[in-house]
Amino acid sequence: MASRAENLARIARAATPTLLGVFGAFMLAAPLRLFEGAVATPLIPLVVVYFWSLYSPGHLPAASIFFIGLLQDLLSGGPLGLWPAVYLAVQYVAISQQSYFLGRETHVVWMGFAVAAASVSIILWLFMSLMSATLLPLGGLVFQMLTTIAVYPLFAVAFGNLHRRVIIEV
Amino acid sequence: MDVLGQDKREVFGLRTNSHTGTLLFSLVALILLLSSLYAAEASVFKKARETAMETASPILKLFSGPIGWIHDRVGDVGDYFRVLEQNKALREENAALRQWEEEARSLRAVISALEELDAYEAPPTIKPINAFVIGEANEAYAHSMIVNAGAKAGAAVGYAAVDERGMIGRLVSVSNNASRILLLNDIQSRIPVFVEGSFVEGLLVGRSTSNPTIAITMLANGARIEPGQRVVTSGAGGVLPRGLTVGVVSKVTDKEAVVELAADYARTRLVRIISYEFPQIDEIEQGAESQSTSAPNQSAVERSDDQPAPQAQAAAATAPPSPDEGD
């Protein structure tokens, strides 16, 4: 019985990043309206995807990322497959730059996240503009990305502790 | 301990080549994206969205409960600091509303007199469905809300949704217990509207900014639109009822008129879905052709033709507020 409990705990630990991403996707669909709607809801799944792709890609496999993105698409009512593609692109880049970022100071990784968020914004804006055949306003998107970049250090510290103390600690 | 860690690596693929999986799933995502763009309204995707909404609605309800509670508390605290100015604003609003009450009473008398006439036929009754906002799309280019009333409560795709201030959007996806409202400022939103005061009909187009615009290129008399004029739904196209408050024209340029929405999306929590059975003009016309001498049908046709006129008169009557008219 003990081993079964251990197994369950292990599975729960291994699934934590995925569950956090799913939680983030639900947060994006919840009527949070921070500060009476003055502040955009941060893209927590983007932080989750970037963080774990960098530090431990094995804990957040591509299938999980695909699922998180798809959930976000389904809940927001946008075109299906957009966020999975964006998140997987982030994962691809993060994994390929892993050797540079691992072991660096947190602000370097933060800058990396800012660059990733900016690239994602450009991709999203180009794609949505192309799809609606007009040049869409950038304001809301930039604001949301800036909010996400601003809260990244908080989540990075929380996720870092979680990862070190809960997920890989056996 | 070592064995467990080893196990985990094998079981959860810590050492797999992640690029392969990433590329594989990226490909799947891109194919999905292309196919969902190519056939946006395909039943598979529609069904998937509805199922996801239905499945997620209990979770979203669970989330929105505490969020609403916190909002109420925060709002209460904020209110304490603004009691005086709020009181003043409410007094002023109350005074203005009293005038309107007076006018509404006199208008009601006029209307009841008109209703006595034989030619009068009651407009189809509007049956509202109340619903709470349990979710919304917090993305830059998706403006929609999820409410906790669906097909079981009588909602259907195309119905209008209003809050206590004005129209907020239109239902685009309905499952058994939840529906998605496409907000008026979404890039895909198109609503036929009517500008009171200038009697212009137009199409309200979402611009993905906070204020949608009326495209003037489509209009015959766009030049007559002026800032401050009220915008209501026109009922053209037979989808939405006529006369729902949309907002006020705030800015007019050569190409478009910007409309400031009456609804405040950051405060919308309770929503009324308006199920509206539009009068079936086609059937009546066919009936009128087959038996052109029958009086009730003919009057029905006339009514449907003249439909804009009473509204316009009503608009003209409401435009200059004259409270002493009823005395």
Image (cartoon, coloured by chain):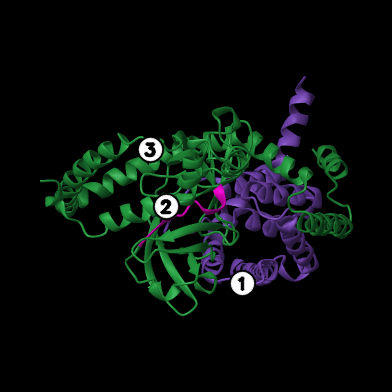
Colour used to depict chain A in the structure image: purple
Residues marked 3 and 2, same chain: yes
In 3D space, how far apart are the residues under numbered discs 2 and 1 (Cα atoms)?
A: 31 Å
Quarter of the view holding residue A42: bottom right
Please state the chain letter of the residue tagged with numbered disc 2 in the rendered image.
Answer: B
Please state the chain letter of the residue tagged with numbered disc 1 in the rendered image.
Answer: A
The secondary structure type at the circle numbered 1 is helix
Q: Which residues are magenta?
A: B230-238
- What residue type is disc 1 on? Met
Magenta stretch contains residue B234: yes
Circle 1 packing at 10 Å, graded few (<14), some (14-19), many (20+), is few
The reply to whether residue B128 is visible in this rendering is yes
Please state the chain letter of the residue tagged with numbered disc 3 in the rendered image.
Answer: B
Give coordinates of residue A24: x percent, y percent: 61, 48
Circle 2 packing at 10 Å, graded few (<14), some (14-19), many (20+), is some
Determine whether, in the image, residue B104 is placed left or right of residue A85: left
Q: Which residue is mark 3?
A: B120
Colour used to depict chain B in the structure image: green
Res A111 label: 1
Residue at 43% across / 69% down in the picture?
B258
Res B266 label: 2
Disc 3 + disc 1, Cβ < 8 Å:
no
